[in-house]
């Protein structure tokens, strides 16, 4: 037989046990609160208090002495600079996270097929170790319009010059009153008609002797030769004698010819012959029928050299800064998506391959749908980060185009401290930025909680 306790004693024991458990839980909460207290104090001092202070400050004027209600919020949407910042922020939110998520997905899938996958991931992730300040300086130099400084424009100029001949005399011009007149299209024509057998001396100025082509030769001897009866003959020369002296409009013995200058013979508005000058500046237009012609120096002889792309101009400054942002964050996106990719069930992929599915079909119908939760988290995380972008925009965009590249974060700083000195309007911009970020943060937190369940 087993002994049983009376019912009243069992009740006493049960209540005692319950009291002990409640006391233990209470002590656990107190201990947890004690350990969390420093973090809560820091959170309150660095996050909660600044948020509440900014919300309150947004209802006051610039000095902070007069209550203005919602005037700062209405002014915010009337200011053209703020509207441009909102537009640029929308561009950032749409373009940057989409490109980063897509690039990260493609690279994560491709890296799995690369033999040295770890080294490749390391190279792509290395920009994350570079601060935004340093990255901004790097890309500010890379985007420099001077091809001698900016690596991108140096590459663009080299590529352009490889397929298109550049003008050898962009600064050359005709000496006024000496046989050549300028045209609206940038070309030059002879003022007098010439006929086969005639000699034409076409003098140019504006070219520094040090800028002459290395093969340039003196034009004096070429000016002494006679033209054949069936050709137009002449010389294009630099009408400037080093050291001074010489006569204007005449070819002196020490004056240099201008090689590679295109010459056209024009009759009744139609080009009938064309050639280029020799190293001594001489040219021969042969096979010319009798009659009168006009000699023309095409505008291509004087076209300004190609200097590359204005990466930091008003049109391209935002895409250029987004490009710098992609360089930094592509590795982050690739690593996170790669981690999700490593958890995919391999048997599903192998079964699809055995059923004859192509790699593209596997990628589109299996890999992407299974990675959808990871892709969503990466995308929302990047959206939150993009809304707060400040460093790159402020550092890369030059002063004259700062307003064209501004986003909400930079506009908030410029209005508050960068010359505007209006902390009321700046606080309103900060509250707007907070309201835009909070929904994305809540969405991300809910996804994390669902994934943990």
Image (cartoon, grey):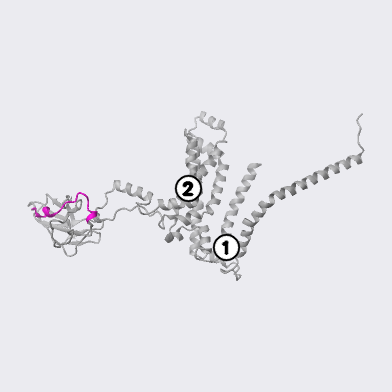
Place of residue 64 in the rendered image (x, y in percent of width and height, measured from the top left): 59, 68
Quadrant containing the N terminus in the rendered view:
top right
Q: Position of residue 181 (x, y in %)?
A: 19, 62
| Quadrant occupied by the C terminus | top right
Check disc 1: other Cα within 10 Å, few if <14, some if 14-19, many if 20+: many
Q: Is residue 182 magenta?
A: no
Helix, strand or loop under label 2: helix
Q: Identify the residue under disc 2.
A: 326
Q: Position of residue 37 (x, y in %)?
A: 69, 52
The answer to which of 141 and 60 lies nearer the viewer is 141
| Residue at 54% over, 47% down | 379
In the image, which residues are magenta? Answer: 209-225
Q: Residue at x 47, y 38 (%)?
A: 120
Q: Nearer the viewer, residue 280 or 380?
A: 280
- Residue pointed to by mark 1: 427
Q: Is residue 266 above or below residue 415?
A: above
């Amino acid at each position: 037989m087993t002994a049983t306790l009376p019912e009243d004693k069992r009740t006493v024991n049960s209540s005692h046990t319950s009291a002990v458990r409640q006391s233990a839980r209470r002590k656990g909460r107190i201990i947890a609160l004690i350990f969390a207290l420093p973090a809560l104090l820091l959170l309150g001092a660095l996050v909660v208090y600044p948020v509440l202070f900014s919300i309150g400050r947004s209802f006051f004027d610039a000095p902070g002495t007069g209550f203005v209600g919602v005037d700062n919020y209405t002014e915010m949407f009337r200011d053209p600079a703020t509207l441009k910042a909102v537009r640029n922020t929308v561009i950032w939110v749409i373009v940057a996270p989409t490109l980063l998520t897509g690039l990260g997905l493609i690279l994560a899938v491709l890296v799995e097929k690369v033999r040295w996958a770890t080294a490749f991931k390391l190279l792509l992730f290395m920009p994350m170790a570079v601060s935004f300040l340093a990255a901004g300086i790097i890309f500010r130099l890379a985007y420099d319009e001077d091809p001698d400084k900016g690596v991108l424009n140096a590459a663009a100029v080299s590529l352009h010059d490889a397929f298109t001949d550049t003008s050898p005399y962009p600064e050359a011009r005709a000496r006024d009153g000496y046989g050549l007149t300028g045209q609206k299209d940038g070309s030059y024509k002879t003022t007098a008609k010439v006929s086969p057998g005639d000699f034409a001396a076409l003098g140019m100025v504006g070219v520094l002797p040090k800028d002459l082509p290395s093969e340039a030769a003196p034009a004096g001897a070429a000016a002494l030769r006679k033209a054949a009866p069936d050709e137009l003959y002449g010389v294009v020369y630099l009408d400037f004698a080093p050291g001074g002296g010489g006569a204007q409009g005449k070819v002196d013995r020490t004056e240099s010819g201008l090689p590679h200058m295109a010459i056209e013979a024009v009759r009744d508005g139609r080009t009938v012959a064309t050639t280029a000058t020799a190293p001594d500046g001489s040219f021969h237009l042969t096979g010319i029928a009798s009659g009168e012609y006009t000699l023309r120096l095409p505008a291509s002889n004087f076209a300004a050299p190609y200097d590359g792309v204005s990466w930091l101009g008003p049109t391209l400054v935002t895409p250029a800064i987004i490009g710098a942002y992609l360089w930094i964050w592509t590795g982050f996106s690739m690593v996170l998506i790669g981690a999700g990719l490593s958890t995919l069930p391999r048997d599903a992929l192998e079964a699809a391959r055995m059923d004859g599915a192509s790699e593209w079909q596997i990628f589109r119908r299996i890999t992407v749908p299974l990675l959808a939760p990871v892709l969503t988290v990466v995308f929302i995380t990047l959206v939150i980060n993009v809304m707060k972008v400040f460093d790159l925009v402020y550092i890369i965009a030059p002063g004259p185009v700062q307003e064209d590249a501004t986003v909400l974060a930079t506009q908030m700083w410029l209005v508050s401290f960068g010359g505007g000195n209006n902390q009321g309007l700046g606080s309103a911009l900060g509250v707007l930025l907070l309201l835009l970020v909070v929904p994305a943060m809540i969405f991300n937190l809910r996804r994390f909680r669902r994934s943990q369940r």
